[in-house]
Amino acid sequence: PQTIYLKDYKPFGWIVKDVSLRFVLHPTETRVFSTITFSPNPDPAAERRFFLHGEHLKLKSAKIDGNPVSVDITPEGLTCDVPGCDFTWEAEVEIAPAENTALEGLYMSNGMYCTQCEAEGFRKITYYPDRPDVMSTFTVRIEGDEPVKLSNGNPAGQGDGWAEWHDPWPKPAYLFALVAGDLVNHPDRFTTKSGKDVELNIWVRPGDEGKCAFGMDALKASMKWDEDVYGREYDLDIFNIVAVDDFNMGAMENKGLNIFNSSCVLASPETSTDANFERIEAIIAHEYFHNWTGNRITCRDWFQLCLKEGLTVYRDSQFTSDLRSAPVKRISDVIDLRGRQFPEDQGPLSHPVRPESFQEINNFYTATVYEKGAEVIGMLNRLVGDDAYAKALDLYFDRHDGDAATIEDWLKVFEDTTGRDLTQFKRWYSQSGTPRLKVAEDWADGTYTLTFTQDTPPTPGQPDKAPQVIPIAVGLLNPNGDEVLPTTVLEMTEATQSFTFDGLASRPVASILREFSAPVVLERDQSPQERAFLLAHDTDPFCRWDASRELARASILAMIRDGAAPDTAWLDGLERVVFDDTLDPSFRELMLAVPTQSELAQNLFEMGETPDPDAIHRAVETLRQAMAERWADRLPRLAKDTWVTASYAPNADQSGKRALGAAVLSLTTRLDGGAAAQAQYDAADNMTLQLSALGNLIRAGKGDLAVKSFYNQWKEDRLVMDKWFGLQVGAAEPDQAVEVARALTRHPDFDWKNPNRFRAVFGALAMHHAGFHRADGAGYALLADWLITLDDKNPQTTARMCSAFQTWKRYDAGRQAHARAALKRIMAKPGLSRDTSEMVSRILE
Ligand code: HT7
Ligand code: ZN
C-alpha cells in the first residue's frame, strides 16, 4: 500500500466553482449525475495532473463542455485531458448502496439511504477531487419514493418524488450528506443572537420520536453556548440531525445535516443511563461546534485533522464543564486520557498529534489526534491566559473563515495576538510520546526549590526528543493545610529547570500539575504521608483525587508484589472524603474508584516488571472486598443519602447521586450476596438503576433470572440490547469472559454486521483486562477470528478494534506468543483491507 506524506502536499490544479448533483435512488442501481465547473488554479505550486478520485463506481458517461471525453480509469480514480481554461465536467455513475457494508459513501441502514463521507467516502459516490482543500458550493436534487429526502444547506424546492437543497457555504466533499427514507421528525426552533429564526429537526425511525427531546435541548444549549462563549452564530435556515442504526463512529458534522449513530442521540430515562445522557449532550455539542471549527474553517489536508478535532474536543469539554461540574469533567477527562491515549502514545501505534505519514487516514481518528490534540490547546490557553485565548480565537475566525487551514495558521494567530514565539511549543504537534516529568524538591534558608526534569522515551520513528514547553500549575500548602501560594503556572522550556519560592515560614507541601495542566507522566518520589496530606487538604480537586489515586496504586502494587494488606492509612483518608456529605457526590464517586486493571498493568510494565493480569485482578478484588468490609456499617446510610426521590432527570445533581449510589451498591453486593441489587432491580424505573443492579447480580453469580427478564423486557430495543450483550461480557469472571462472549456470538440477536452490536461484545471483551489477556490466548484467538470475519464487510471498524492488541508486548512470553500468533493470522488473511493491514503491521513491529 502507498504511504502518503505531509511533506508532499501540493494544492489541486483546479478550483471547483460549483457542484450540482442529481441522485436517482435505487438500492442496487442508484444513478448519480454530477455537473462540476472547474477553473485553473493560478497557484504555481499546484499539481498539474487532472485527477478525480473515484472508487467502486460504474461510469456511464463523461463529458467536458457537453462533449464526450475518453478517460483513464484506475481503482483509485480517473484522469483525462482537460482544457486550459474554465470548463464544465459532467458525469453519470451507477452505485449500489444496498451492497455497501463498509458504511462509507452512500449506503443503506434499515431501508434508509444515508451517507458517510469523512474522510474519503465521497469518492465512492462520484468522481471528484475528494480532498479537504477543494471547497465548493453544492446544489443537490434527490429523486426517489422515500417520503423524506435531505441534504446539506437550505431547502430549495420539492415536488412529487423529488427534493432539492442548496448549500451556499463552500465546503469540502467530506461534509457532503444525503439521507432519504421513511423518517419522522422531532421539530423545534432557535432564534440566533442576531434574530435569525432557525428550523431544527431530529429525524428518526417511526417509533423513536419519544427519544429526541433531550438531544434537542442539548442542541439548543450548544447553539446558545457557542454564541455566548465564542461569539459563533449558526449560518443556515435549518439544522437537521438524523439518527442511523448502522454507523462506524459516534456522529458526523456534515454541514447543516449532522448524522448520528442512534446510540449517540436517542435517549429516554427508561432506556438510557445517566452516562448515555451525558455522552449524548457532549456529542451533540461537539458536532454542532464543528460548524465553525471544521466546517467554516476546515483542514488543508488530513494531516491537519487535529486542527478541527482537537479544537472541537476542547470546546465540547469547556461546554460540559460549564453545564455540569468542571472538576468532575476534568478528572473524567484525565481518566480517559490515561486509559486510552497514554497506552497509544507509549506503544507501537504512537504517532504525533499531527502525523507525518499514513496509509489509511481512517486509522488516525485516534485518542492522540482528538484528546491529546485538545490537551495541547488547553496548554496554549493556560500559557497565554483566557483573555489572550479569546482574542486569538476571534482572530482565527476572522482571518481564516472559508479557508482550509493548517496548524501553522492556528499557531500564527496566537503568535500575532500575544507576541510569543511558539516555535518550541509546536513540538507538541510533531513529537510523539508522553513526556515524563521528574520532580525534585529542596528546602534551605527559607527558600523552597522545585527542580523538574523532562524526558520523552523513544517512539516509532522518533528515537530522540527535544524538550517541550510544559505549563506546570503548582500551589503550595503550609503544614497546617493552608494554601500559601495559590495556583501559579510555571513555564518549563528546558530539559532541566528549577523554580524557587522565597519568603516561606516553613517548608511547604507542593501540589503539582494542578488541573492536570499538561499531558505528562509526573514522577514524584513522595512519601505516603505527604500524599495523604494532599488528599486531605489540597484545594485543587484534581490533585486531591490524584493523591488518592497514587496511594491506591501504591497499595495495590504492594499487594501484588509482596502480598501486603490494603493500606489502611490511605483508606482512612479516603473515608473522610467519601463520607463527607458536603462534597459533590460525583467527586466522591470518582474518589472511590480504583485505577483500572489495564492502568495497573501499564504501571508495572513502566517499572520494568511483567504484569500478571490474574494477580492484578485478585489484588483489586481483595481491595474492594476490604473496602466493603471496612465500611459495612456506613454503607446503608450512604445508600440512603444518595437515593433520588424526585422524578428522574439526567442532570449533574441527580446523576452524581446515582453514580455514588452505584458504587455503594457494588460494595454492598460483596456483603449481602446480591440482596440489595435484586431489590434495586425489581424497583428500578430507569435504566441507570436497572443496569447497575443487573451488573451486580451477574457479578454476584445471581444474574440468571434477571438476564432473562431483561432480555424479554427489552428485546425489541436495539440500543438496550447492546447494553445487555456488553454487560454480560464485562461482568463475567476472568476465566468466563471469553466463553460468555463466544456464546453471545451464537445468539440469534448477534447481528455482527452492525458496528454497535459487534463493539458491544468485542469492545467489552477487549476492556475485560483479565478476561481478554487470558494466559491460554483464548481471548486473543476469539477476537482475531471475528476481526478476520468482519474485515471483508467493514474494514474501518475492524481496523479500529485491532487496537485491543496494542499493549501485547507488556505481557509474559506465553501471552506474547499467543498474541503474535493471533496478529499474524489476521495479517495472513487473503485480501486483508488496507485499513487492517496497516494497523496490524504497526502493532506487530
Ligand atoms: N468528524 C467525524 C469523524 C469521522 C467519522 C464519523 C462517523 C463515521 C466515520 C467517520 N470517520 C471520521 C466525527 C467527529 O469527530 O466529530
Ligand atoms: Zn469531531
Image (cartoon, grey):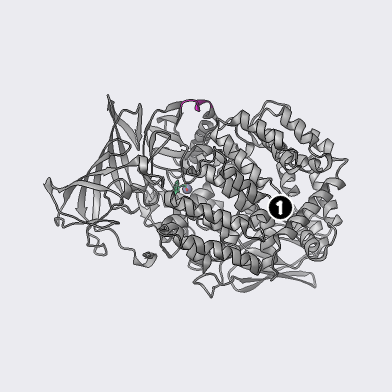
75 displayed left or right of 199: left
Image coordinates of residue 566 in percent, x first then y, are 83, 56
Task: Name the foreground residue: 47 vs 508.
Answer: 47
Q: Residue at x 44, y 27 (%)?
A: 185
425, 287: nearer the viewer: 287
Q: Which residue is mark 1?
A: 540
The magenta span reads 206-210
Please tell me which residue lies in front, 563 or 162: 563
- Where disc 1 sits, the SS reads loop
For the N terminus, the quadrant is: bottom left
Q: Main secondary structure of the magenta part?
A: loop
Q: Is residue 744 visible?
A: yes
The amino acid marked with disc number 1 is Asp
Q: Position of residue 196 (x, y in %)?
A: 40, 31
List the single residue furthest toward the right.
633
Asked if residue 809 is positioned above or below residue 692 in the image, the reply reads below
Q: Is residue 8 above or below residue 145?
A: below
Let me know if residue 372 appears in the view: no
